[in-house]
Image (cartoon, rainbow, N blue to C red):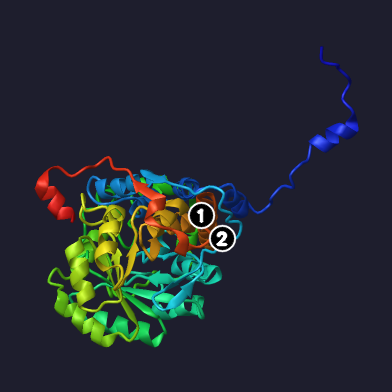
Amino acid sequence: MVQRQLPKVGELLELMQFKKPELDARKRRLDAALTIADLRTIAKRRTPKAAFDYTDGAAEGELSLDRARRAFEDVEFHPDILRPAADVDTSCEILGGPSALPFGIAPTGFTRLMQTEGETAGASAAAAAGIPFTLSTLGTTSIEGVKAANPVGRNWFQLYVMKQRDISYGLVERAAKAGFDTLQFTVDTPIAGARLRDKRNGFSIPPQLTVGTIVNAIPRPWWWIDFLTTPKLEFASLSTTGGTVGELLNAAMDPTISYDDLDVIRGMWPGKIVVKGVQNVQDAARLVDLGVDGIVLSNHGGRQLDRAPIPFHLLPKVVREVGKDATVMVDTGIMNGADIVASIALGAKFTLIGRAYLYGLMAGGRQGVDRTIAILRSEIERTMTLLGVSSLEELEPRHVTQLTRLVPVGDQAVDARV
């Protein structure tokens, strides 16, 4: 029989340690977020539906995005045992400079619509973390504003070639003058993809008030207060606004963009040049033959061509073909530090995060972006330690198996993926 006794006050006090309450509401909700999915939940609660869906959504049936995320979920890791990895080094050299982590912040458009700190929050958080920040052509903070927010860190610029070429050329010159060290020449957006959530929500620039938006705004007054009491949205490349995002993109983008445009921009840009939006091995090989410094395997976060190739699945083939001659990077679908570790193991030199950064931004501004980076850093370090590797250089293809639910059928499908 168990011996019973009256509880002793001293013993109870030892067992009952009360946590000091956190009075800062923003810090309290961000500290409660343990994953990027948690940040997404907070972001959805705090952001009007149209702005949240613009970030969260993809093209048409959103199959490309779903498949990209599923590809990362279908990773099987192969850890080594009895290999101490107590001190994990997550730093790397990328495109001629350092990064404290194997990921940077991807270019995102209309960012201040999601949360008014916008690119300033992203650039300053990247500076604090020692990782690159990429400004979009369709960003809502100027090139010079990002430089001010990240004066000594690494800034990259993402370029769309516009119908009015002089606009694009002017942006290239400004980015070079501001000391941006890498240009991401984006090739997957000759026109806008069919982003159906935006059409259904009537999402436009500037936001248009309807009965639906007003009702949706009632439980989120802070967003509207911030939007109405901060400086007017300004765009790096759009001189006029008014219309849906798709209409604005189609008015600005040029479906005739070609290799000739790449050649012109290469002649103007003094730093490293990377082509973003590569989706097959043949294009990767041709670009490397032309002398680009790197490529980003990307289907634009699933926001352009639905049913596009899965960048993570394409990664090993491209690395085998061109990995010795150019820097291969990957984006689309990254929601966990383990996704980044798997990408590095399969040969990527670097990765880019888009939505993960924006979920943090919407959840808590600059502090939310810091939280995104902290979550991913922790997941990367933990995954590497459990795999038994102390540095990114020790990660190898043998550490990862890509399990596939989607298997090509027939010789034609196989040829298309080679």
Q: Position of residue 333 (x, y in %)?
A: 35, 52
Residue farthest front in this picture: 82
User: Secondary structure beneath disc 1?
Assistant: helix
How dense is the environment of label 1, judged by Cα within 10 Å: few (below 14), some, or many (20 and up)?
Answer: many
Q: Can residue 166 be seen in this view?
A: no
For marks 2 and 1, the one nearer the N-term is 2
Position of the C terminus, as image quadrant, is bottom left
Could you say which is closer to the camera, residue 247 or residue 64?
64
Above or below, 169 relative to 245: below
- Please say if the residues under marks 2 and 1 sit with CB atoms less than 8 Å apart: yes
Could you say which is closer to the camera, residue 347 or residue 214?
347
Return the residue at label 2: 88
Q: Position of residue 399 (x, y in %)?
A: 42, 51
Q: Position of residue 392 (x, y in %)?
A: 47, 62
Above or below, 23 relative to 132: above
Could you say which is closer to the camera, residue 159 or residue 348?
348
Check residue 384 in the rendering and tell me which mark sits there, or answer none.
Answer: 1
Which residue is drawn at the image coordinates 18% and 79% (left, top)? 261
Residue type indicated by callout 2 = Val
Q: Distance between the residues labelled 2 and 1?
A: 7 Å
